Amino acid sequence: GAIDKLHQFLDSTRTVRADFSQTVVARNGRQGQLSSGVMIISRPGKFRWQIDKPYAQLLVGDGEKIWIYDPDLRQVTVRKAGPALGGTPAALLAGDSRIEKDFSLRETGERDGLEWVEAVPRTTDSGFEKVSLGFAGDELRAMILLDSLGQTSSLVFARIERNPQLAPSLFRFTPPPNTDVLGE
Amino acid sequence: CSTAPAPASLPSPAQRDELQDFSLAGRFSLRQEGQSYTGRLDWRHADDGDELLLSSPLGQGMAEIVSNAAGARLTSADGRTQGAASADELLQAVLGYPLPLDKLADWVRGRSPQGGVMAVDAWGRPSRLHYEDWRIAYEYDSDDPQALPGRLLVERETLLELRLRIDQWLPLARPSTPSPR
């Protein structure tokens, strides 16, 4: 079932690269922002989340720190990894701990051609209600996250590469010249 | 009014000077006494009140502020809620700093509040606003004289800096019988 697929995906995937498209819908159903880009993950803890459209934004995590670079705001914000990312899809995928430690899992059947498993955080302050992961065969194709303010963020992955060779520099970030750096 | 020349790029969804109620979607970064916050902002400003949704850069809801005549309330993602008599009081309690939401609603539309000094650009649009010890700088995405701002830099000496990038403006139609302000 989908739970085995999730385990198999997490056990057999050390690195992953995929194109993503994300739709965020607010509680009142108003279509929020549509964005797309590239997601690169190297477990445990390292990720590169690059938004290309409708604007450019880059998030890089090296396991200790997270850099958020927004060229439009001409600014880089640096945060400690861990709680800041705690309950996000990237953290779930990049996480090192056994998923059952942090989430209770439940198979929720087939929909839109994918087999779904629902993960509910065991702690209440993770900042989101639940996340559903959709598999086609043993490939993770979608993640739908319902946050605690009623917003639903749907991520669809395409051109998924499992265990590609990844240059370490992908998970380091050096701010461009004359960009403001905030945070630790 | 005279028909404005065809805007170069992004057509402005509303005439800046006539914009009353609005909703905007964009990104912000706020730096204030060593604390820095960055993320996405969805803001609905209407005659009867404000709704602000602050999300993480990945679009995950972090906090929601609802303010109307009855008062203001903040609900954060971990379920905590906080109330205050007004949005300004609430922001003061949450940020430890008086970020005047009602003034911000004027500034973001390029309105100069009582006692403000506004410098305009070559197209007659708000360019720099001085109000008390606040300084606001504007940038636009087109050369339409009635364009709404695309970027704002709000500074209060070295105490606070708010950068706002507005990705989308949506004018909100007033109810058919607009209540006299």
Image (spheres, rainbow, N blue to C red):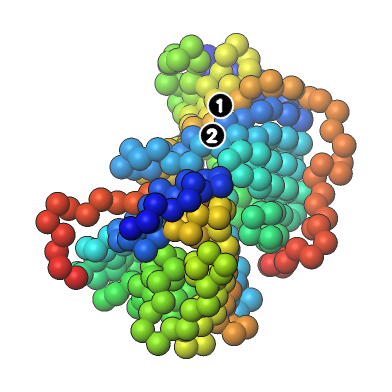
Q: What element does badge 2 sit on?
A: strand
Residue A22 numbered tag: 2
Residue A156 numbered tag: 1
Residue A149: % across, % down: 38, 49
Q: Residue at x 86, y 44 (%)?
A: A169
B99 versus B115 height, above or below? above
Q: Is there a contact, CB below 8 Å, between mark 1 and mark 2?
A: yes
Q: Residue at x 72, y 36 (%)?
A: A41
Label 1: chain letter: A
Residue A18: % across, % down: 69, 27
* Residue A123 visible at all: no
A58 versus A41 height, above or below? below
Q: What element does badge 1 sit on?
A: strand
Task: Give the spatial CA distance, label 1 vs label 2.
Answer: 7 Å
Mark 1 crowdedness (10 Å alpha carbons): few <14, some 14-19, many ≥20 = some
What amino acid is at disc 1?
Val
The one of A163 and B13 positioned closer to us in this rendering: B13
A53 versus B26 height, above or below? above
Residue B14: % across, % down: 38, 52
